[in-house]
Amino acid sequence: MRQGLLALAVVASCGACAATLPAVETPSADDVARLPRLGSSLPHTAGSVRFLVIGDSGTGGREQYDVATTIARAHVTFPFDFALMLGDNLYGRDGASARANKFEKPYKPLLAAGVTFHAALGNHDNPNQRFYEPFGMDGRRYYSFRRMDVEFFALDSNDVTGEQVSWLAKALQGSDAPWKIAYLHHPLYSSGKKHGSEEEVRAVVEPLFLQHGVDVVFAGHEHFYERMKPQQGIVHFTQGGAAKLRRGNIRENSPLTARGFDADRSFTLVEIAGDQMFFETISRVGELVDSGVVTRRELAGTPPTKEETD
């Protein structure tokens, strides 16, 4: 467990104190700088690819702002460059006011620091969010982008059309990136009692992932964190707890689960250095939930994961 848990969480846990706070309050950069710093098991390697992963984040509620504050703390000690959003980015209305309250205000410190966001669409999202410039979609429901040795493939799992599958096959085949990471809203593998594995989507895209060397898949939709045991060499993460939570929803003794956390909200930090992907999942109040290392899949004779915690 981390030392020096989030000071804001202590305030929020006090009924009398919390009553004096606005329902949604954005910390200033000075406020964030004064908070106790989070430790980190990530290597902080020069020239590495560093990013944040959040899913099901767009509620505009107190819990989203708590998570966002902890993320801002983490960014002080682990300055990641961009963030993957795994869908359900804006629940309910998504006009200018909603976008401000559910995205721009909670992540103001990150946006001010130059962090860019790259969203996938969730089942609660208006497809027109793809035209919202801060989501980095450039008007596309599915797309790819590259950061050094890593190429990311954002999919629209709400409607996996033949056109999207053709695009994915061509994009994966044409990529010479050593690392290939896919992200989408619906998890191909999940131990969730509410939804579970999205088998129809899996039947369509997994063969392409296997054929063209996808190493890691991130998904949301289930309102908790789960790291699956490698499936045919690919490591799958569900990170759907950045604002929503479905407490106690991970099936007990699931053969899929390497590590699960459904007791509070969370987010995941990732660093890719060389042939290894280091990850660290942190709860709303700053506790270390999970951490480990994923080795690039194509390396023959190398186990796909080396777990630090289980």
Image (tube, helix red, strand yellow):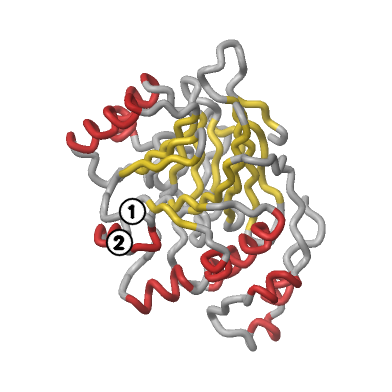
Residue type, numbered disc 1: Met
Mark 2 touches mark 1? (CB < 8 Å): yes
Who's the residue at 51% across and 33% down the image?
149
The answer for how far apart the CA atoms under marks 2 and 1 are is 8 Å
Who's the residue at 81% across and 61% down the image?
4
Q: Position of 13 compared to 241: left or right?
A: right
Q: Give above or below for 240 relative to 294.
A: below
Mark 1 = which residue?
137
Q: Nearer the viewer, mark 2 or mark 1?
A: 1
Who's the residue at 31% across and 59% down the image?
125
Secondary structure state at the residue bearing disc 2 = helix
Q: Position of residue 156 (x, y in %)?
A: 30, 45
Secondary structure state at the residue bearing disc 1 = loop
Q: Position of 213 compared to 277: left or right?
A: left
Label number found at residue 129: 2
Q: Quadrant of residue 13?
A: bottom right
Q: Position of residue 180 (x, y in %)?
A: 45, 31
